[in-house]
Image (spheres, grey):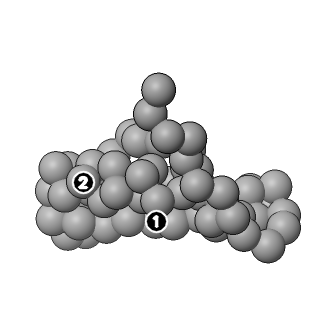
């Protein structure tokens, strides 16, 4: 999967590929990232045939913190 240049067009923007043994672990990591930075949110989780684990990709802006809950 290619990374679109606009997702890393300036300092502070990152693309993180997460690999874990199961979907619950990936979702826990994505949830933790959402609490730390502004992110693209929980993304679809996928498996690659013949490779161990499940994967997800998240886009984050590490310059910004999420808005506090209302």
For the question of whether residue 12 can be seen, the reply is yes
- Which mark, residue 6? none
Q: Is residue 41 left or right of residue 14?
A: left
* Rendered image: mark on residue 28: 2
Residue extending furthest bottom?
A: 11
Cβ–Cβ under 8 Å for marks 2 and 1? no
Q: Pointer 1: residues within 10 angstroms few (<14), some, or many (20+)?
A: few
Q: Is residue 12 left or right of residue 16?
A: right
Point out residue 23 in the picture as x, y percentages from the top left corner.
Answer: 20, 50
Q: Residue at x 27, y 49 (%)?
A: 27
Q: Is residue 21 above or below residue 69?
A: below
**Residues under labels 2 and 1: Cα distance?**
14 Å
Q: Nearer the viewer, residue 11 or 2?
A: 11
* Local SS, label 2: helix
**Residue 10 in the image: x percent, y percent?**
84, 67
Quadrant in which residue 64 is drawn: bottom right
* Outermost residue toward the top in this view: 70
- Tell whether 39 sits left or right of 21: right
Q: Which residue is mark 1?
A: 17
Q: Within the image, what quadrant is residue 6 found in?
A: bottom right
Which class describes the residues within 10 Å of circle 2: few (<14), some (14-19), or many (20+)? few
Question: What residue is drawn where x is 31% and y is 67%?
Answer: 19
Query: Which quarter shows the N terminus?
Result: bottom right
Can you say whether 20 is above or below 65 in the image? Answer: below
Q: Is residue 1 visible?
A: no
Q: 41 or 52: which is nearer to us? A: 41
N-terminal-most mark, 2 or 1: 1
Q: Residue at x 84, y 64 (%)?
A: 9
* Number of callouts: 2
Picture coordinates of residue 69 (x, y %)? 44, 33
Q: Nearer the viewer, residue 48 or 17?
A: 17
Quick one: 28 or 66, which is closer to the camera?
66
């Amino acid at each position: 999967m290619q990374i679109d240049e606009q997702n890393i067009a300036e300092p502070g923007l990152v693309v993180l590929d997460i690999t874990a043994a199961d979907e619950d672990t990936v979702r826990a990591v994505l949830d933790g990232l959402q609490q730390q930075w502004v992110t693209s949110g929980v993304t679809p989780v996928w498996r690659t045939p013949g490779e161990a684990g499940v994967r997800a990709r998240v886009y984050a802006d590490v310059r910004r913190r999420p808005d506090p809950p209302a």
